[in-house]
Amino acid sequence: MPAPSALVLGGSGGIGAAVSRRLADEHAVAIGYHRDRERAEALRTELAEAGATVETVQADAATEDGVLASFDAAQKLGELSVVVNCVGGWDYPKIAELTAVDIDASLALNLRSALLVLRESARRVADGGRVVMLSSAAADVAPARQSTYAAAKAGLEAASRVAAKELAGRGVTVNVIRPGATDTPYFRNVTSPRAIEAMAAANAMRRLGTPEDIAGAVMLLCADDAAWVTGAVLDATGGLR
Ligand SMILES: NC(=O)c1ccc[n+]([C@@H]2O[C@H](COP(=O)([O-])OP(=O)(O)OC[C@H]3O[C@@H](n4cnc5c(N)ncnc54)[C@H](OP(=O)(O)O)[C@@H]3O)[C@@H](O)[C@H]2O)c1
């Protein structure tokens, strides 16, 4: 029997790659990427050499066609049992300086993509499957200079909870992970050293999260034992609150 398949959108990114590595132990994995083909292909090679079945799919998850293509790629690998959405991004605009273009871009990347992923999950994830959506502590903390990102991730959380209700009849769970500051190349690119230091000191464990910390939380929600957990929003922040 072929292995069940998993789709990780943003699956070669900082957090996404850690999730893809974990899922590849028991699933054939479709890894969605957008711009960084080299990084996605390097991960595919790494996992294939370790014996996993892996495909990459280039797609813009903010578009209908991109999300359809991502799910098509995963379904080609086997029965789709897990979807993890790691697509997202942010910068730090002051609210007084926002433009309509910035707002639309952030909502498309962080929220429209999430709604399209939830819709396709409703249509295509097999009975008893798992959907995990990556939010951010920003949705809860509402930090300065994260207006569009916090709003989009709060929307992602609400939509995921709605999807949890609609998909429950088929035993499909839909849950949200809310990472705190996590040490990825993207995070380091957009965040100043001073802000990084402050964020690392802000949680109870007094350090940044690692991609593996977040992947571990995702795996909890993908476990068979999590079948009764749906519509949950799980903080993975090292104790930020
Ligand atoms: N790092 C943190 O501190 C942190 C904290 C809270 C929440 N998060 C959330 O965790 C997730 C991963 O973050 P990360 O730090 O690992 O950043 P990352 O490495 O930049 O990951 C983002 C991923 O999304 C993909 N992506 C970007 N735009 C896309 C688009 N239009 N269509 C399809 N894929 C697209 C990227 O692919 P390409 O690189 O190939 O373009 C990349 O794989 C995001 O949802 C982020 O909001 C991160």
Image: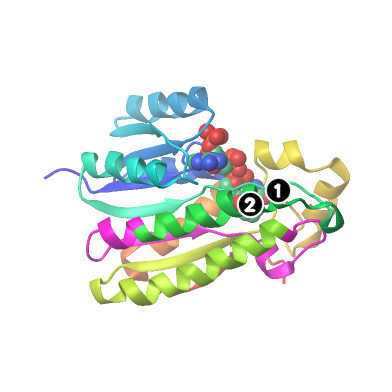
The residue positioned 33% from the left and 32% from the top of the image is 55
Decide whether residue 137 is among the magenta residues: yes
> What element does badge 2 sit on?
helix
Q: CA distance from mark 1 to mark 2?
A: 6 Å
The reply to whether discs 1 and 2 touch (Cβ–Cβ < 8 Å) is yes
Circle 1 residues within 10 Å: few <14, some 14–19, many ≥20 = few
Which colour assignment does the render follow?
A: rainbow
Q: Position of residue 119 (x, y in %)?
A: 37, 60
What residue is pinned by disc 1? 102
Disc 1 residue type (three-letter) = Asp
- Name above or below for residue 36 compared with residue 73: above
Disc 2 residue type (three-letter) = Asp
What residue is pinned by disc 2? 104
Q: Is residue 237 left or right of residue 221?
A: right
Per the rendered image, the range of residues in magenta is 120-147
* Residue nearest the viewer, comparing 11 with 207: 11
The residue positioned 75% from the left and 57% from the top of the image is 146
